[in-house]
């Protein structure tokens, strides 16, 4: 289980993460993920904290989020074996996704 450091504001996982530069990777990092359903969720203290967007193929997240420039969000999968936080500055990666995104650091 992951315990994010910041669940509102500039979202952050905190410890034991791979940090990937946002610039140049914001809309392309997801191409390195496994082709599996993924869950996108946002600020965890707002009115919509229980809202989850299900994407059938994690590789498509970057294309989807191009339409929502500047959004901060978390990404995980059904097994919750990884957590990704995308904020205005970096992409933080924890769990199994470190292996998928390691070459982007």
Image (spheres, rainbow, N blue to C red):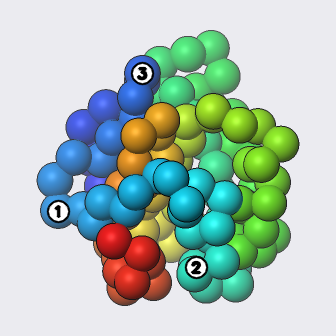
Above or below residue 58? Residue 102 is: below
Residue sitting at x 55%, y 62%:
25
Disc 3 on helix, strand or loop?
loop
Query: In the image, what residue occupies the spot 40% across and 48% down?
Result: 90
Which of the pair 32/43 is nearer the observer?
32
Crowd class of label 3 (few under 14; some 14 to 19; many from 20; radius 10 Å): few
**In the rendered image, which residue does mark 3 sit on?**
9
Q: What whole-number distance in Å separates the C-alpha atoms at marks 2 and 3? A: 25 Å
Secondary structure beneath label 2: loop
Disc 3/disc 1 C-alpha distance (Å): 20 Å
Q: Secondary structure at mark 1?
A: loop
| Image quadrant where one finds the C terminus | bottom left
The Cα atoms of the two marked residues, 2 and 1, are separated by 19 Å
What is the quadrant of residue 78 in the picture? bottom right
Left or right: 88 in relation to 53: left
Which residue does the image show at 42% across and 68% down from the upper left?
82
Tell me residue 54's x, y (percent): 76, 56
Return the x and y of residue 29 as percentages of the image width and height.
57, 68
Mark closer to the chain start, 2 or 3: 3
């Amino acid at each position: 289980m992951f315990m994010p450091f910041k669940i509102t504001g500039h979202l952050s996982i905190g410890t034991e993460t791979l940090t990937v530069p946002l610039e140049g990777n914001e809309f392309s990092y997801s191409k390195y993920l496994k082709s599996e359903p993924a869950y996108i969720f946002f600020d965890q203290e707002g009115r919509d904290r229980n809202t989850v967007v299900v994407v059938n193929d994690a590789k498509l997240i970057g294309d989807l989020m191009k339409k929502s420039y500047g959004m901060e969000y978390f990404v995980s999968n059904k097994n919750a074996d990884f957590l990704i936080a995308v904020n205005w500055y970096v992409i933080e990666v924890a769990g199994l996704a470190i292996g998928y995104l390691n070459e982007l650091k």
